[in-house]
Image (cartoon, helix red, strand yellow):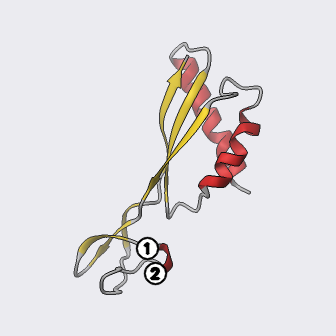
């Protein structure tokens, strides 16, 4: 489960930010995860509490904002992609080789205490 290593990385970045701003602990963090990022939100939620134990994020609330995949169809322009169809336009089925969004894994917000 690579989500455990992702949780550890998020905790590392959040802890650095905490120290830069002089806080003592983080009570909440928000992460944006694209549906095409290969990150399973439920697995990240499950891994986070154990990874945060003994850090300034212990007990912090993890919020995950899902980001839909948006591809560019040569005929229809930007379209919301469906995982079941792969990188194809849901209207006409043409390949959508350009992904505008949906592969994000971003630490979006921190709540410091």
Residue at 71% in and 47% down: 46
| Whether label 2 touches label 1, CB < 8 Å | yes
> Is residue 64 rendered to the left or right of residue 1?
left
| Vertical position of residue 107 compared to residue 33: above or below | above
Badge 2: few (under 14), some or many (20 or more) residues near its Cα, within 10 Å? few
Toward which corner of the image does residue 74 lie, by quadrant?
A: bottom left
The quarter of the picture where the N terminus appears is: bottom right
Residue at 39% in and 80% down: 88
> Is residue 90 rendered to the left or right of residue 25?
left
Toward which corner of the image does residue 67 lie, by quadrant?
A: bottom left
Disc 2 secondary structure class: helix
Residue at numbered disc 2: 85
> Is residue 70 rendered to the left or right of residue 27?
left
Q: Residue furthest bottom?
A: 93
Residue 5's disc is: none
Seen from the viewer's position, the closer of residues 72 and 84 is 84
Residue 82's disc is: 1
Badge 1: few (under 14), some or many (20 or more) residues near its Cα, within 10 Å? some
Disc 1 secondary structure class: loop
Residue 20, percent from left and from top: 53, 19
Residue at 56% in and 21% down: 18
Residue 4, percent from left and from top: 72, 48
Marks 2 and 1 sit apart, C-alpha to C-alpha, by 5 Å
Residue at 58% in and 18% down: 19
| Vertical position of residue 13 compared to residue 75: above or below | above
Residue 104, percent from left and from top: 47, 53
| Vertical position of residue 112 compared to residue 3: above or below | above
């Amino acid at each position: 489960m690579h989500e455990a290593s992702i949780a550890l990385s998020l905790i590392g970045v959040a802890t650095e930010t905490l120290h830069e701003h002089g806080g003592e602990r983080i009570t909440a963090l928000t992460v944006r995860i694209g549906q095409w990022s290969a990150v399973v939100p439920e697995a990240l939620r499950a891994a986070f509490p154990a990874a945060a134990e003994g850090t300034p994020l212990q007990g912090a609330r993890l919020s995950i904002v899902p980001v839909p995949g948006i591809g560019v169809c040569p005929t229809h322009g930007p379209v919301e992609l469906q995982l079941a169809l792969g990188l194809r336009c849901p209207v006409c089925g043409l390949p959508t080789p350009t992904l505008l969004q949906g592969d994000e894994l971003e630490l979006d917000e921190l709540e410091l205490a």
